[in-house]
Amino acid sequence: MADFLQLLGASSKIKYTDKTVEKKYYRISSEQWTRIKKAACMLSDHNIGPYVIEAIDTHHTIVYKRVNPIYYEEDLNNSVLQHKLVNVVKQLHELGYGHGDLGNFQNIAIDPDTGNILLLDPDTIYNIENDRYSEFVKKWMNHGFGLNPESEIDWKEFVNNDYQLVEDISFLV
């Protein structure tokens, strides 16, 4: 699968401290920065992503409360966590957004304080209704998933791909 930021001609660097994660974006357009910042804040505001401490426009940087991503599918290998993950994805979709990269275990975390499932990496988050024909979604669908952005069937597959990780894990239980 292609790296999403590379498709945009951008990159990022992550800096960890004991209490925070700082993600700085490089060579990113103001449109993409605004989209990513908005997505990160939306996840934070709805408690389905890590808490955003600060978004620094002048440096294209988002500072989050530190949570640790899941590194192995076994970490999600129980029905309670799977149920929580399905509910988080449903909540994201009810808000009108899709994630676009939940096939990667490292884009999911468990909040150590609450036990809630959190979605990480807002880079690929898109508005289901408004972003279908945007350049970044078309590139991601085509290069990341091999799907045709003009096809209604492929669009539905792309949106529903957010649930694929849960389906993959359910075979392990």
Image (cartoon, rainbow, N blue to C red):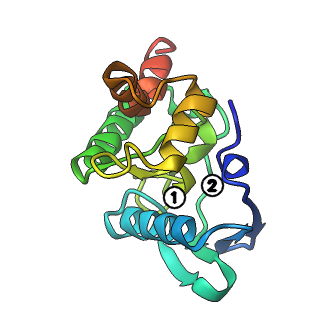
In-front residue for pair 64/95: 95
The label on residue 89 is none
Query: Residue 92 placed where, x, y %?
Result: 31, 49
Image check: 18 left or right of 133? right
Circle 2/circle 1 CB separation < 8 Å: yes
Query: Residue 149 placed where, x, y %?
Result: 44, 31
Marks 2 and 1, how far apart at CA: 8 Å
Query: Residue 60 placed where, x, y %?
Result: 64, 77
- Determine the residue positioned at 31% across, 52% down: 130
Q: Which residue is mark 2?
A: 68
The crowd level at tag 2 (other Cα within 10 Å; few <14, some 14-19, many 20+) is some
Q: Which residue is mark 1?
A: 112
Q: Quadrant of residue 20?
A: bottom right
Q: Is residue 38 above or below residue 76?
A: below
Give the number of marks: 2
Q: Is residue 169 above or below residue 67?
A: above
* Kind of residue sitting beneath label 1: Pro
Query: Residue 169 placed where, x, y %?
Result: 49, 21
- Determine the residue positioned at 37% across, 33% down: 159
Q: Residue furthest left?
A: 94
In-front residue for pair 41/171: 41
Residue 101 makes an appearance in the image:
no
* Disc nearer the start of the sequence (2/1): 2
Element marked by disc 1: loop
- Determine the residue positioned at 48% across, 24% down: 148
Q: Residue furthest top?
A: 171
Viewer-nearest of discs 2 and 1: 2
- Determine the residue positioned at 46% across, 51% down: 125
Element marked by disc 2: loop
Image check: 39 left or right of 32? left
